[in-house]
């Protein structure tokens, strides 16, 4: 499933040069984004970067200041929210306080004129999805925050809108329930052939559920890609830092040969990389490397590049892996995660030990900004 890679595929949702201003504040800045039918698409970014505003414009609660939004080829300009084939679940649930859980979920179905038996069946299915079958008769005020959020989720999925917009739909759930619901949402989305656009600031959640992710910063999209693309090939330091953990080494390129480049890192060692497209000798850059690509050893590795000494500052044993924070002589703390094995368990590296950090030339990425 990769319609975005097909040059002929028509986008289902198209934002073209969309800007939204509130007074003289620009919340969304000349943004272009295409999402395809049946995609599970996530908007990821820090608080205030414009994610919710983007969804609200799609749902019709805000009009763009300029630019166009199309849904399934139709322009949305001037179309009121209730005439759009879109359902939005808000951060603030907005349940009907006087209706039971089951009646809240049934509400939209009744309005649509669905037959009674079918409604009961659908409501049951939805309450099962969010694990609230035994709460069907309760009123919203008799529920916890997380339970209320699950009712809102059940209600918004119940109508099976072709396009469902979810703003932090799982934010109030505890970790375990959140993870279970993520997988159930994904199953449901595939099973029913729906298109989901979801706002989250939880990068793990976005990685788990999405076909593609847009990483936003201050009203613009910095990068759009599959979870693997965003993680393995972040376009900027901002994206690398936002998705997962990363170590960053600043420096200057001293030599280029074929696909290889050498970076004289400010932390006092030389980094050799073959992921330095577009860089020339003399250029300034940042080498980004994930903790799981950095090895920790007592002895100095044989290669003269990509090795630096430091002192173990923190250790966290997490069962399958051990996380090391190692302080270099430059003062920088580098994170390395090492798979536990006989080597690491029988004679574990301890606090304050001097160690070598090393990595292979193809294990990181040189970034210009
Ligand atoms: P969060 O993760 O906190 O929900 P967000 O990325 O969804 O953040 P938005 O709600 O889209 O952010 O808001 C983007 C920016 O626009 C914020 O700085 C916000 O204060 C501003 N903003 C949103 N709505 C309005 C409004 N009606 N009037 C003025 N400013 C607004």
Image (cartoon, rainbow, N blue to C red):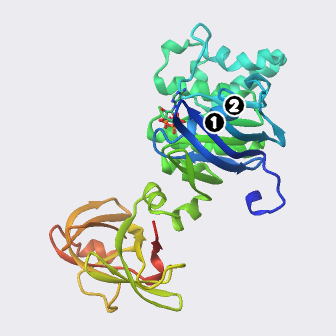
Crowding at label 2, few (<14), some or many (≥20) Cα neighbours within 10 Å? many
For the residue labelled by badge 2, is the local secondary structure a helix, a strand or a loop? helix
Is 174 or 67 nearer to us in this picture?
67
| Residues at marks 1 and 2, CA–CA distance in whole angstroms | 6 Å
Task: Answer with the quarter of the image where residue 67 lies.
Answer: top right
**Image spot of residue 240 (x, y percent):** 46, 61
Residue 261 placed where, x, y %?
45, 86
Task: Please provide percent x and percent y for residue 211.
Answer: 65, 54
Q: Residue furthest front?
A: 24
Which residue is identified by label 1?
Answer: 55
Query: Residue 313 placed where, x, y %?
Result: 19, 64
Checking the image for residue 223, the label placed there is: none
Tell me: is circle 1 under 8 Å from ligand 1.
yes
Q: Is residue 134 above or below residue 44?
A: above
User: Considering depth in this image, is 365 or 41 the residue closer to the camera?
Assistant: 365
- Quarter-of-image position of residue 180: top right
Q: Is residue 330 left or right of residue 232?
A: left
* Residue at 28%, 75% in the rendered image: 266
Graded by Cα atoms within 10 Å as few (under 14), some (14 to 19) or many (20 or more), the crowding at tag 1 reads: many
Residue located 29% across and 61% down the image: 317
Q: Is residue 366 above or below residue 84?
A: below
Residue plotted at (55% across, 12% down): 139
Residue 21 visible at all:
yes
In contact (CB < 8 Å): disc 1 and disc 2: yes
Of helix, strand and loop, which one carries label 1? helix
Q: Can residue 1 be seen here?
A: no
């Amino acid at each position: 499933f990769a319609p975005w890679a097909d040059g002929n595929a028509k986008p289902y949702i198209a934002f073209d040069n969309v800007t939204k201003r509130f007074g003289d504040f620009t919340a969304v800045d000349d943004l272009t984004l295409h999402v395809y039918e049946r995609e599970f698409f996530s908007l990821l970014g820090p608080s205030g970067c414009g994610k919710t505003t983007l969804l609200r414009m799609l749902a019709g609660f805000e009009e763009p200041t300029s630019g166009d939004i199309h849904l399934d080829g139709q322009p949305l300009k001037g179309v009121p929210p209730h005439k759009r084939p879109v359902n939005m679940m808000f951060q603030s649930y907005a349940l009907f306080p006087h209706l039971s859980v089951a009646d809240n979920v049934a509400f939209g179905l009744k309005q649509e004129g669905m037959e009674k038996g079918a409604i009961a069946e659908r409501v049951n299915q939805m309450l099962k999805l969010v694990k609230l079958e035994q709460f069907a008769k309760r009123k919203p005020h008799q529920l916890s925050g997380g339970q209320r959020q699950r009712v809102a989720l059940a209600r918004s999925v119940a109508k099976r809108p072709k396009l469902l917009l979810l703003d932090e739909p799982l934010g109030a759930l505890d970790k375990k329930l959140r993870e279970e619901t993520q997988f159930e949402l994904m199953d449901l989305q595939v099973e029913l052939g729906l298109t989901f656009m979801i706002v989250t600031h939880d990068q793990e959640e976005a990685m788990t559920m999405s076909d593609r992710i847009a990483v936003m910063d201050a009203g613009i999209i910095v990068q759009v890609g599959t979870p693997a693309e965003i993680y393995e090939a972040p376009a900027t330091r901002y994206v690398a830092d936002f998705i997962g953990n990363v170590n960053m080494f600043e420096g200057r390129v001293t030599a280029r040969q074929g696909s290889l480049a050498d970076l004289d890192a400010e932390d006092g060692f030389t980094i050799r990389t073959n992921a330095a497209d577009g860089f020339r000798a003399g250029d300034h850059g940042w080498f980004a490397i994930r903790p799981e690509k950095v090895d920790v050893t007592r002895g100095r590795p044989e290669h003269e590049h990509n090795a630096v000494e430091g002192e173990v500052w923190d250790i966290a044993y997490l069962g399958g892996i051990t996380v090391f924070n190692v302080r270099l002589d430059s003062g920088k703390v580098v994170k390395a995660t090492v798979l536990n094995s006989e080597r690491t368990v029988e004679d574990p590296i301890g606090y304050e030990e001097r160690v070598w950090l090393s990595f292979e030339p193809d294990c990181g990425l040189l970034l210009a900004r």
